[in-house]
Every structure is written in structure tokens, then in C-alpha cells.
Image (tube, rainbow, N blue to C red):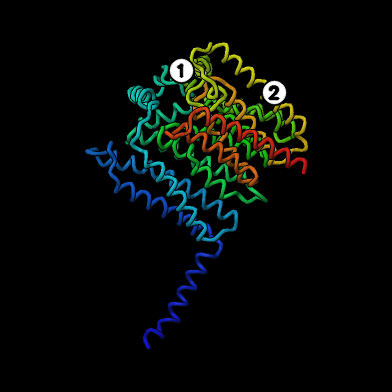
Amino acid sequence: MSGRRLTPHADALDERLRALLLSPVGRLCGYGAAAMTAAAFLLLMMMRTFVRLQGAGMALRLGSVLLLSLPALLSALAAVQIVRARGGSLLDALLGCALCGAALLARVSFIERSAGDYDIYLAKWIELLAGQSFAGSMRGSVGEYNVLYQYILYLITRLPVVPLYAVKAVSFMGDAMLAAGMARLCARDGKPSMAAFAAALLLPAAVLNGGMFAQCDSLYAGCAVWALALSLEGRHTRSAVCFALSLCFKLQAVFLLPMVVVLWAGRRLRLADAGVFLLTILAVMLPALLAGKSPAAILQIYTAQTGLYTGLTYSAPSLFGLIATEGLDVYAYGNFGMALAFGACLALLAYGAAHAQQMNEDDHVRLGFLLVTAIVFLLPRMHDRYFYLADMLAAALACRDRRYAPAAVMMALASLSTLWLTPVPLWGAALLVLAGWTWVCAAGTRREEN
């Protein structure tokens, strides 16, 4: 009898819970889900044993854990915003937050690993910055990063955090920004793409770049993706600002920057936006200039990077990964590669500018992928991580049109095989990149014919 009396109440509870989870998520419930995700991640990090925190004081432990938990909050907030824009339910928001937590856990799995670049360069630069004032650090020649990232490194030295964890946490925040930009770039009818958001968080290149290697490619790539997305939405000024910030983070932003020619030809950017671009760069440089760094020293950061490496390839699945480079004249073959890259860039830009008025959003993303991939594939002295933005644009293409999915898979496999020890040799990874580029060309041509 008692069991039968409880059944209606149990059914009513089920219905109320089901109605709550399946109804469109409100702002309060969505932000609550994001906050719970961050709190759960914070608790998990507090219980975790960190090698570099053993014997450390509470301030250092709490500061490091809080900073590592901040990307969880940012990515969860982005996921909630996407779900709300799509008219999704509270259950969708909770699943999106869970996805963000899982993606960040994958990155934290490598948190103790300090790759070669960090040990050889970053750790020493951070140590130098820690012993100087801001003016002294700017006037000196500390590192080969542009001043915007130098500001971040300087700030890290003033926080009660483990430097390695802080560097990686900054990259994880960039991952959240990049994922939100990918969702915006792949939006349909004003609704951001959750598939693109998930792809940006879970791609092998994204997980390993910051998590294992402590690299910050998500920062420049995120700004570049946002710049392209905003230009396609007709937000000229914001797009120009994002293009400038991308270049302020890393020189590799120039791989996508030529797209502004096509965007301008298609009236998606204006000539006045060039002024916004330059003013943004000047605003970023201003703190360093006021601290006593000369404009020539800031520009030298960019020029020095072009001559820093002399090899034809540094584990990059490029044209030079297809040939045996030992014993070759690196300067002659390097110049040959640069000529090919310049020619391919001009050819793609000429095609894009000629068809700019007829190009839709899919066409622009496709051209962006073809441009970035062709330049990195043909240029000498490329590193494996320089295909980072190409991987993202390939994933964006796949999220916009499933016909491009094979190309996205090939690009992801090529990057995985160069970033991680796999049975795929470098020439095999280079063939995957070439096959992915060709697939996008062919699929785009068939689409135009139809």
C-alpha cells in the first residue's frame, strides 16, 4: 500500500525534474551550471597531487589551482552562451559544461611535462622577468615573443603561481577563446555551432599544444578565427582589432592575414579598417614604448624570428618532409620554397579577389584553409605546430559541410603524427596534408558545379 501511495509523488518528481532539464536554459541556470563546473574542477585540482607543489605554501598552491580552474569557468561560460543562443535546454548546457571539463582534464594530464622549448627558453625568460621591474624587462631583450605575450609572462611572475602551470593555464584560456570563435565562425542562421566548439577543444593539436608543449598558438589562432568570423558578420572594426591582436601575439598570424585582400574586395572589410588595425598594434606596443623600449627593438622581434632557424623543416609535414633534406643547400631550396609559397599565395588571392562578390561564408572559410595550408606546406623552416590554424580551419569546414570531413581527419592525423610518436613517418604526414588540401579543392569545385 505504501509503495502505491509513493508512486504518484515519484512520478511528479520525475516530471518536474524532466521539465527543468528539458526546458530552455535561462541565464541564471546556465551561469549556475558554469559555476558548478568551475567549482567541481577546482575541488578536483585541490585534491590532485602536483609535483611542483609538494612542500609549497598554501598561497602558491591555491594560486596555481585557481589559475588552472579559470579556463574551466571561461570555457563553460562559452558553452552555456552557445546553448542559449541555440535555444537549448539546461541538459544541453550541463553536457556542454561536462565537455569543457573533460577537455581541460585531458590537458591537465600533461601538466607536469615541461617540453624542450619551456626548459630551454621560457623558464629562463620568466626567471629574468621576475628579477626586473616592468620598465627594465621591456628595455631589455628577454625572449623572442612579441610584447603582448611578454606582458603576460611578466604578470605571471607577479602572481603566487607555479610558472609552468601559469604558462599552460594561459594557453588553456586561449583554447576557450578559440573554441568560442570556432562556434561563431561555423554559425548557421545566427546559431553558433556546438560541434565546432567541441572540435576546437578536442582536436589533438589543441590538446597537445598547450597541455604537453606549453605553447600559446591558441592565442594567435583564436584571434585570427574571431577576425574571420567577425568580418563575415560585417563587423569590420572588431575584425580589424582581432587581426591586429593575432599578429601581436605571433608572427604566424601572417599565414591568414592575406585574406584581408579578399575580404576587402568582397566589401567585408573597409579601407578605414587598416587604420583600426594599425592603431590596435600601436596601443599594444604603447606600454612597452612608455617603459623605454624603442620601436626598432619591437620590430626587431618580428624580423629576428624570420632568421632564427635555417633548417628546411622542423618536424613539419611540409613539402620538405617529402624529400631527403640531408646535404641539400638549405638556402637555395629554402628560397625555392619561399618562391612557391609566394606564388601560391598570389594565385589564391587573385582567384578570391576575382570571385569575392559571389563568395559566401563557406567559400571564405575554404579559401582561408587553402591559403594557410599552402603557405605553411611550401615554406621552409616550418615547425610542426605551424599547421595549428590549418587544423582549425579544416575542422571549421567539416562542421559547416560534412563533405570536408575527410580533409579535417587527414589534417588532424598529420598533426598528431608529428606532435606525438606514431608509426606514421614524416613523409606520410606530409602526404596526408597534401591529400587534405587536394580534397578541399576538389570538394569545393564539385560544390560550385552543382
The kind of residue tagged 2 is Leu
How many numbered discs, if any? 2
Q: Quadrant of the C terminus?
A: top right
Pointer 1 with pointer 2, Cβ within 8 A: no
Secondary structure under badge 2?
A: helix
Q: Is residue 119 above or below residue 29?
A: above
Q: Quadrant of the N terminus?
A: bottom left
The kind of residue tagged 1 is Gly
Secondary structure under badge 1?
A: loop
Depth check, front residue: 367 or 271: 367
Q: Which residue position holds label 2?
A: 346
Q: Which residue position holds label 1?
A: 292
Q: Earlier in the sequence, mark 1 or mark 2?
A: 1
Residue 447 image position (x, y, % from top left): 73, 42
Using the image, tell me which numbered label, if any, was put on residue 60.
none
Left or right of 243 on screen, residue 127? left
